Image (cartoon, grey):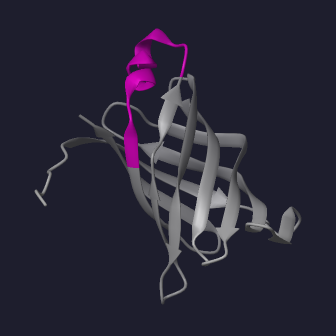
Amino acid sequence: MTEVQIDVDHLFSLTVQVGDRTHAVIRNGPAGTRMIAPVTGGSFTGPKVSGTVITPAGDWVHVRKNRTLQLDVRLQLVTDDGVPILMTYQGIGTANSDGTTSLRTAPTFETGDEKYNWLNDIQAVGIGSADADTVTYEIYALR
């Protein structure tokens, strides 16, 4: 098999705070357990775009029978100059022995603002980790 190198540009670092996940749980469904993890806030900082994460936002998590997480996230970003951007992504989370979770995601973006419309055509990748209260990512645009 030939190894492929993928070129990326760093978009931003993202940190989100996660709220109580116990109130919206469907346990032992046919495909595993489902829950909603509400995002209560956060921030993102990058060379071309920075701002805050506002509510409502959250992750519709599917805990699969093999204990990996299937992520389905919708975040509302607001840039430092007041522009709203929808960030959505799906991905996979795997538990680490230290109690954290490793995350790999595929974000896309949507905005109507001319200054940031370059985000609409980006396929990004996110590499991150989560603990009980905080999720952090490095977000990269595929070239």
Residue 80 appears anywhere in the view: no
Query: Is 111 located above or below residue 9 in the figure?
Result: above
Question: Where is residue 94 shown, x and y percent of the image?
Answer: 50, 73
Q: Does residue 89 belong to the magenta stretch?
A: no
Give me the residue at 78% from left, 62% from top.
35
Q: Quadrant of the C terminus?
A: top left
Question: Where is residue 65 shown, x and y percent of the image?
Answer: 66, 76
Q: Nearer the viewer, residue 104 or 111?
A: 104
* Residue at the bottom extreme of this rendering: 97
Q: Nearer the viewer, residue 107 or 129?
A: 107
Question: Where is residue 45 shown, x and y percent of the image?
Answer: 41, 43
**Total label count?**
0
* Residue at the top extreme of this rendering: 114
* Residue at the right extreme of this rendering: 23
Which segment is the magenta one?
A: 111-125
Give me the residue at 59% from left, 50% from top.
42
Question: Where is residue 113 shown, x and y percent of the image?
Answer: 51, 13
Q: Nearer the viewer, residue 108 or 76?
A: 108
Side of 84 relative to 40 (left or right): left
Q: Quadrant of the N terminus?
A: bottom left
Q: Does residue 115 belong to the magenta stretch?
A: yes
Give me the residue at 62% from left, 41% from top.
75
Residue 122 appears anywhere in the view: yes
* Residue at the left extreme of this rendering: 2
